[in-house]
Amino acid sequence: MGFQIPQSRSTTSALAEINVTPLVDVMLVLLIIFMVSAPMMQQGVQVDLPKANAGTLNENPEQIILVVNKDRQILMNGKNIPFSTLRGRLESISAAKPNLELYIQGDQAVNYGFVAQVMAEVKQAKIHRVGLVTVPADIAK
């Protein structure tokens, strides 16, 4: 005589449903947080770049971008640099990295002579790979 435990139908089948409502709630809250906080994370300086038909800028770890804004301020890596100390800083950087590429983002409202002076300081710092950053001409604002 065997002893058998009667099994009901509900205990033999496994519960295979996952409640996704809490997951969806959390994802929507995260989406709203990122949508609200993303515009606040904009970094950089607003520079009105001139338009030109040129190729794209290749990302290279040994490159520096100098920003010359409309107030004739020079920024390197987001830090304001006086014009008088620009050559000394660039010389020390070029001594450490001889294959350095430097790109100048000059606001089109800045006097061309000032941008030429910045380029002359770069050349005197023995950086020979210099480029100007522009916006493609076919992009309308």
Image (cartoon, grey):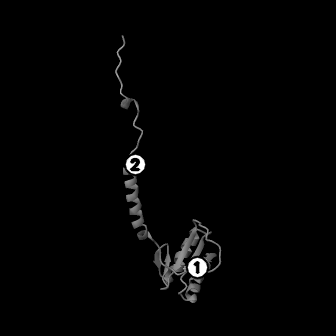
- Disc 2 on helix, strand or loop? loop
Other residues around mark 2 within 10 Å, as few (<14) / some (14–19) / many (≥20) = few
Residue in the foreground of this view, choosing between 79 and 9:
9
Instruction: Name the residue at the top extreme.
Output: 1
Residue in the foreground of this view, choosing between 14 and 91:
14
| Tag of residue 112 | none
Q: CA distance from mark 1 to mark 2?
A: 59 Å
Quadrant of the rendered image containing residue 55: bottom right
Residue topped by disc 2: 20
Q: In the visual, does 76 lie left or right of 13?
A: right
Question: Hey, what amino acid is under mark 1?
Answer: Val
The N terminus appears in which quarter of the rendering?
top left
Name the residue: 59% across, 74% down. 102
Place of residue 85 in the rendered image (x, y in percent of width and height, measured from the top left): 50, 80
Q: In the visual, does 127 lie left or right of 109?
A: right
Question: Hey, what amino acid is under mark 2?
Answer: Val
For the residues bearing labels 1 and 2, Cβ distance under 8 angstroms: no
- Counting the numbered discs, the total is 2
- Disc 1 on helix, strand or loop? helix
> From the viewer's perspective, is the residue at label 1 or at label 2 nearer?
2
Name the residue: 55% across, 74% down. 65
Residue topped by disc 1: 122
